[in-house]
Image (cartoon, rainbow, N blue to C red):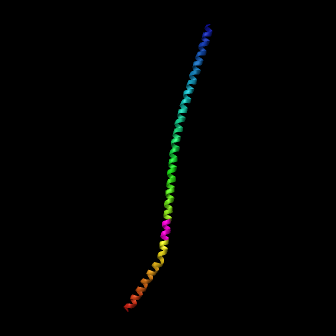
Amino acid sequence: EEEEKVHSQIQMRQQKRQTQQRLDEARQAESMLGELGQLFGKMSSLISQQGETLEKIEDDVECALVDVTAGQEELTKLYSIKKGNRPLIIKTFAILIFLIIFMRAYKK
């Protein structure tokens, strides 16, 4: 009888240790899952921030394209104005040269 009692106490202690070990493992797993949840939350936040940054970059590129196109149009206009003024400039210099020659001839 006493031997059975000792044997049952030993079994109870073993079961208690196993139960405590399982409880510790469950707590450790719960802690790890909590850490994983935090990591996924941080990753989600970073991905969201990167998405916003990419949208800003895309908007800036579109604005740059609009500005470059407007600049190209202005340069084209300037070139056509400059090209259109060449005959006028040549005529103006021709008249000035003619006037200078006429004034010298008139003084004599």
Query: Residue placed farthest to the left in the image?
Result: 107
Q: Please, is residue 19 above or below residue 61 in the view?
A: above
Q: Residue at x 45, y 81 (%)?
A: 91
Q: Please, is residue 32 above or below residue 65 in the view?
A: above
Q: Residue at x 51, y 43 (%)?
A: 46
Query: Residue placed farthest to the bottom in the image?
Result: 108
Q: Residue at x 53, y 41 (%)?
A: 44
Q: Quadrant of residue 18?
A: top right
**Which contiguous range is marked in magenta?**
73-79
The one nearer the camera, 14 or 103, is 103
Q: Is residue 74 magenta?
A: yes
Q: Quadrant of the C terminus?
A: bottom left
Return the x and y of residue 31 as percentages of the image width and height.
53, 30
Return the x and y of residue 26 as percentages of the image width and height.
56, 27
Q: Which is the main secondary structure of the residues drawn in magenta? A: helix
Return the x and y of residue 93 as percentages of the image width and height.
44, 81
Q: Quadrant of the N terminus?
A: top right
Q: Please, is residue 88 above or below residue 39 in the view?
A: below
